[in-house]
């Protein structure tokens, strides 16, 4: 499981891997060949490697132009910093919209990017899952069980990891969505984090701590990561709480770079293609929940994914800017909770 679940989806150091297809001309407007650079968070790699050849074939057929791709995968936060620091991505697919907003604030993406494509720019999504030990000896079935005495929880540090931010918000929102107020949410999340023995810096370290080092009774991870591990033959037991949070991953064209490279048309074409039924099916195969409601209603999808009764969103909590300021900034809710440990 440690290998299959290892990809860092969060904002920590994460590993960064890249693959490159044959080099093409950087200027696309009137060329036979065009090269796109896709920068994404780690767990999308398998899906993109299935989708890209289909897009290339379709674009060649429609435009008589050969598209080649440079691809870079790693932790969402580290990928974001790399793009801001000069990695010339044409398209970014990141773990959370807060990361895309940082690239926007750096002047590389024009404001309003999320309105240029369907679904407010969200192209893949997942929910939080609780990975247990074999046989689930501690009887972990929902979020409330994580606050019990004698339960050790492994989760990464939300100050450094994107997946850990989602984990924290899922815990907090599980109280709000079931009628609790902020005082109750603070009390509950404080209890849970008292059961967290260490805070690894990212999803990779958290998974290794649980799977390789054998620490903890339960690990919070993306549902799609767990499904992918099972597809790779790992024996992974997990629960998807029926009160959950929609883990939404946005896609965006990096305006400054596509205009520099002359790749806007093909970059926008690729982003549009990711919303097609063909591409969404590939995301589903790799464990992501579809953003296309028609696909979401198919038997394949309803059989594959446990039903979530109550699904919270980032919008419910005021959006990423408000969330980061309230929960994860220095002196915010998370720091106060940690100070009580």
Image (cartoon, rainbow, N blue to C red):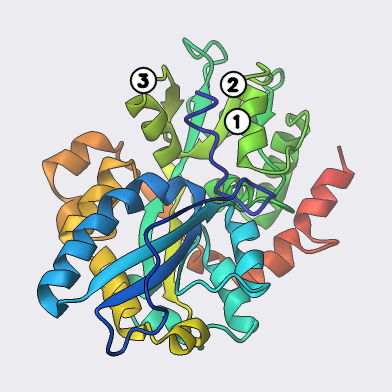
Residue 207 has which mark? 1
Mark 1 vs mark 3: give the one in front: 3
Lateral position of residue 221 relative to residue 204, left or right: left
- The residue indicated by pointer 2 is 211
Q: Judge by depth and name the residue closer to the eye, 115 or 149.
A: 115
- The residue indicated by pointer 3 is 233
Q: Look at the picture and state if 261 lies above or below 273.
A: below
Q: Are marks 1 and 3 in contact (CB under 8 Å)?
A: no
Is residue 293 visible to the viewer in this orientation of the structure?
no
Residue 158 position in % (x across, y down):
69, 50
Q: Judge by depth and name the residue closer to the eye, 68 or 292.
A: 68
Is residue 4 visible to the viewer in this orientation of the structure?
yes
Residue 68 position in % (x across, y down):
33, 65
Residue 320 position in % (x across, y down):
59, 69
Residues at marks 2 and 1, CA–CA distance in whole angstroms: 6 Å
Disc tally is 3
Helix, strand or loop at mark 3? loop
Local crowd size for mark 1, using a 10 Å CA cut-off: few (<14), some (14–19), many (≥20): many
Q: Look at the picture and state if 205 lies above or below 13.
A: above
Lateral position of residue 147 relative to residue 294, left or right: right
Helix, strand or loop at mark 2? helix
**Upstream in sequence: badge 1 or badge 3:** 1
Q: Are marks 2 and 1 in contact (CB under 8 Å)?
A: yes
Lateral position of residue 201 relative to residue 256, left or right: right
């Amino acid at each position: 499981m440690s290998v299959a679940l290892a990809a860092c989806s969060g904002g920590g150091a994460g590993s960064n891997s890249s693959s490159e297809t044959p080099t093409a001309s950087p200027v696309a407007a009137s060329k036979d060949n065009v090269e796109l650079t896709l920068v994404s968070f780690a767990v999308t790699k398998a899906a993109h490697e299935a989708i890209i050849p289909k897009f290339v074939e379709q674009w060649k057929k429609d435009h008589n132009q050969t598209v080649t791709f440079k691809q870079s995968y790693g932790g969402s936060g580290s990928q974001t910093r790399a793009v801001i620091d000069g990695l010339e991505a044409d398209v970014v697919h990141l773990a959370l919209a807060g990361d895309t907003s940082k690239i926007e604030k750096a002047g590389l993406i024009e404001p309003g990017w999320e309105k240029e494509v369907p679904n407010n720019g969200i192209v893949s999504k997942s929910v939080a899952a609780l990975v247990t030990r074999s046989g689930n000896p501690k009887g972990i079935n929902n979020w409330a069980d994580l606050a019990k005495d004698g339960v050790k929880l492994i989760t990464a540090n939300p100050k450094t990891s994107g997946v850990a931010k989602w984990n924290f918000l899922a815990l907090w929102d599980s109280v709000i969505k079931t009628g609790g107020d902020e005082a109750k949410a603070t009390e509950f999340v404080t209890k849970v984090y008292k059961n967290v023995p260490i805070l690894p810096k990212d999803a990779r370290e958290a998974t290794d701590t649980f799977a390789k080092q054998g620490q903890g009774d339960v690990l919070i991870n993306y549902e799609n990561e767990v499904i992918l591990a099972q597809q790779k033959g790992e024996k992974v037991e997990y629960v998807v709480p029926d009160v959950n949070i929609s883990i939404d991953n946005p896609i965006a064209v990096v305006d400054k770079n596509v205009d520099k490279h002359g790749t806007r048309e093909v970059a926008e074409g690729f982003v549009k293609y990711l919303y097609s039924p063909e591409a969404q099916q590939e995301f589903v195969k790799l464990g992501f929940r579809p953003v296309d409601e028609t696909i979401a209603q198919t038997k394949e999808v309803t059989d594959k994914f446990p039903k979530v009764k109550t699904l919270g969103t980032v919008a419910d909590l005021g959006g990423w800017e408000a969330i980061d300021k309230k929960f994860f900034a220095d002196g915010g809710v998370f720091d106060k909770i940690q100070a009580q440990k």
